[in-house]
Image (cartoon, rainbow, N blue to C red):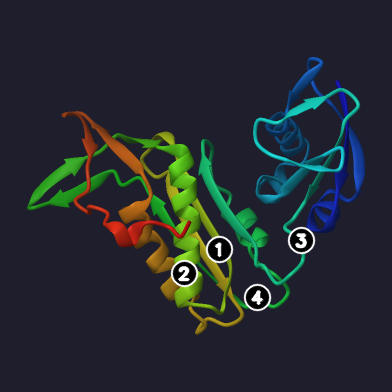
């Protein structure tokens, strides 16, 4: 099928054009199929495409919505009104740090603090060296994304000068040295909360975002379970 694509604002600038035609297999698909095809055509704007709002035939569209031959599909960032860029993802592939930083900065940004977690191959635990070959991450996806948004809301309440926020968790099997998670916060200056917000983001994610890891090593495999038990105060605002 053929779908007309309309791009606006940052997406238009990154693509170098504001409209194009995509050819997709079959007679119909979903809005996520269209997003994937657009990312395949413009890999460098993946973060922007995933964070964008979609509309089909001039009506808002959401994950799972159908797209048919001849439809017009628009992608655009949140409507202007002072909202800063935010990215929340459970990523099956590698995280491009430069791409994410570019996606959460605006002309007024002067500082970005990034926390990047890695798969550690050796861990000293009570004097015993534990060797890890790989990690396997699993998430309760809808809830994990909702709780990532809650973490961002809490960050904004405590550090109102923070601009963009990105929270990205890898899922699936990862080898030693691979990136597992990224928390990034931008601000106008380095003393406007980006350091503290990034630290809070990773600590809070470990408490309330439902993601688990299995450690895989020569001595066997085991799921790693935490100790924090959520309370009523950890519920997001309805």
Could you tell me residue 17's position as x and y percent? Answer: 91, 48
Residue shown at 71%/29% (left/top)? 33
Residue shown at 48%/40% (left/top)? 142
Real-space Cα separation, disc 2 to disc 4, in angstroms: 17 Å
Where 54 sits versus 154, above or below? above
Q: Which residue is mark 2?
A: 155
Q: Are marks 3 and 4 in contact (CB under 8 Å)?
A: no
Residue 109 disc label: 4
Real-space Cα separation, disc 1 to disc 4, in angstroms: 12 Å
Under circle 2, the secondary element is helix
Q: Residue furthest front?
A: 238
Could you tell me residue 156's position as x and y percent? Answer: 51, 71
Residue 79 disc label: 3
Where 92 sits versus 226, above or below? above
Side (left or right) of 64 relative to 199: right
Q: Are marks 2 and 1 in contact (CB under 8 Å)?
A: yes
Q: Which residue is mark 1?
A: 165
State the residue in front, 51 or 44. 51
């Amino acid at each position: 099928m053929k779908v007309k694509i309309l791009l606006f604002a940052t997406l238009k600038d990154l693509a170098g054009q504001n409209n194009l035609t995509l050819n997709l297999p079959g007679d119909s698909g979903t809005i996520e199929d269209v997003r994937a095809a657009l990312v395949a055509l413009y890999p460098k704007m993946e973060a922007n495409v995933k964070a964008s709002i979609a509309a089909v035939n001039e009506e808002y569209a959401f994950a799972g919505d159908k797209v048919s031959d001849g439809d017009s599909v628009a992608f655009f960032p949140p409507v202007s009104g002072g909202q800063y860029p935010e990215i929340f993802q459970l990523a099956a592939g590698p995280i491009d740090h430069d791409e994410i930083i570019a996606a959460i900065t605006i002309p007024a940004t002067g500082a970005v603090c990034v926390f990047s977690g890695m798969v550690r191959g050796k861990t000293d635990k009570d004097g015993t060296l534990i060797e890890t070959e790989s990690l396997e991450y699993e998430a309760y996806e809808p809830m994990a994304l909702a709780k990532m948004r809650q973490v961002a809301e809490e960050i904004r309440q405590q550090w109102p000068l923070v601009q963009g926020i990105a929270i990205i968790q890898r899922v699936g099997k990862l080898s030693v040295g691979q990136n597992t998670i990224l928390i990034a916060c931008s601000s106008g200056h380095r003393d406007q909360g980006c350091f503290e917000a990034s630290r809070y983001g990773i600590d809070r994610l470990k408490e309330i975002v439902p993601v688990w890891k299995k450690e895989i090593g020569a001595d066997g495999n085991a799921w790693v379970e935490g100790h924090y038990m959520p309370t009523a105060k950890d519920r997001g605002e309805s």
